[in-house]
Image (cartoon, coloured by chain):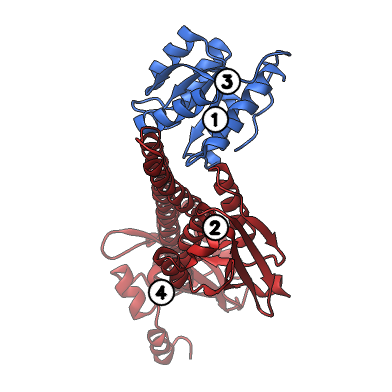
Amino acid sequence: MHDGLDFERTLDLIGEPVLVVTASGRVERVNRLARDLLGLDPSGGSLSAVLAEEEGAERRFLARCSGSASPLPGTLTVRLGDGTVRRLPCRGALLNPAEEGRPARLLLRLRERGTDEFSILRRTVQDLNAEIRRRQRTLVELEAAVRHRDVLLAELHHRVRNTTQMLLGMIAAAEREAGGPELAAFIAAMRIRLLAIGTAQQFMYASPSAQTVPADDFLPALCRALADADLPAPKLALDAIGAEIGNDIAVPLALLVAEVAGRGGAVSLRVEPGDQDALLVIEGAGACAADWSSPLLRGLARQIGLDLSPGPGRAAGSLRLPRPREVAA
Amino acid sequence: VIAPADSDLAVPGAATTGRLLVVEDDPFICMEIEAIAEDAGHVVVGVAGRADEAVARALATLPDLVLMDIRLIGARDGIEAALEIRARAGIPSLFVSANTDRATVARAEPARPAGWVPKPFTRQQLLAAIAAALAHRTGV
């Protein structure tokens, strides 16, 4: 049956080039795809006529295959019909063992590179490598963008701090040259307001949060800055830790405290614990208490949501501050 | 205000007012530093707005301390000037700057700064830093 027409049709049904060769390398049959690939029908001739292998290479491969009924992988360098030479993957197996008067026959299946699963795998690996390189490039670009943003942010912060210092210098120079005590006091009030803004700005930049500044650090720094500016130092009591002051109220709060302190009298700040938050209580007694109804202080209090409760000889306001849950607990 | 770094310049028995060189390119800030320092009894022996000018004035006047800004007019900055002044005359610099990020502080470390005063500063902050730097230098 193998030598008959059915065997030839069977070979033609295989979807890859197939050669039936003897163990000694004589080609007995080929299928249609092999004829198309080779550009000729090598049946009856030597396999080496269509190969461009080094001496003995195909014999070693045939010898290996003649001992195995399972397909063994290998490669054959084949002269193709278009005149080119290509190294093609090949699987070879024993088809018929040798019999009396007839040599062993082998079946060789050539695989064109494009359909080889190894080629598909290799292409997949290449695609993955390309994707990795693309992502690495994107990562490098993102890191560069983040560095650039940090540089811009640092530069912006530097400019703000330097400009604040320059304005403080300008105001201090004007204060020194002021013609009378009233003008000097007015300019000093401007200087203190700017100092309060500068203190809040520094904390907003340095804070790890983009939305808040830590009250535990900000309020002591503000009190120190006001004391450094020759104002009566506000009395500060931090009875609750971990409270946060929103960036939107940090500047007006600093201005309000500076304004109250600048009007004389005793000022105290107290952070008290609440259930889920903290309460900032600002109290003024003496000279500053009478000024709580001034338009500026009322405006600043309104801006930060300070609940004012004026009384005789003293004035107080309170403001709720959020606390992170783990600190509050 | 950051405390001065370890220094090998201790001279026991000296006073805490001193002769200062102010290196600052902004005229308003420069005037403010001069006024604060002189009001407190220090002597400002010169001012400079560029690194080369700062080095030349430091070598000419030999101040006790240089109050050094970092961003200056010109190609060289205050850290380079402080390094050269420290190397050639042994005079320490107290950095008065808005550039107090970690990278800048690390870059200035070889100049063995006498301290850092971040801008914006108050009169007390500046005077405290000057006093600490001079005391450290003189061992008071």
What is the letter of the red chain?
A
Which numbered circle lies on residue A115? 4
Label 2 CA crowd tier, 10 Å (few <14, some 14–19, many 20+): some
Which is more foreground, mark 2 or mark 4?
A: 2
- Distance of label 3 from label 1 (alpha carbons): 12 Å
- The residue that label 1 is drawn on is B108
Q: In the rendered image, is residue A24 in sight?
A: no
Residue A103's place in the image compared with A126, above or below, is: below
Q: Position of residue A3 (x, y in %)?
A: 45, 86
Label 3 CA crowd tier, 10 Å (few <14, some 14–19, many 20+): many
- The residue that label 3 is drawn on is B92
Which is more foreground, mark 3 or mark 1?
A: 3
- The residue that label 2 is drawn on is A287
What is the letter of the blue chain?
B
Label 4 CA crowd tier, 10 Å (few <14, some 14–19, many 20+): few
**Of callouts 3 and 1, the N-terminal one:** 3
Callout 3, which amino acid?
A: Pro
Q: Position of residue A243 (x, y in %)?
A: 63, 67
- Distance of label 2 from label 3 (alpha carbons): 46 Å
Q: Position of residue A207 (x, y in %)?
A: 55, 57
Element assignment for label 2: helix
Residue at the far front: name it: A312
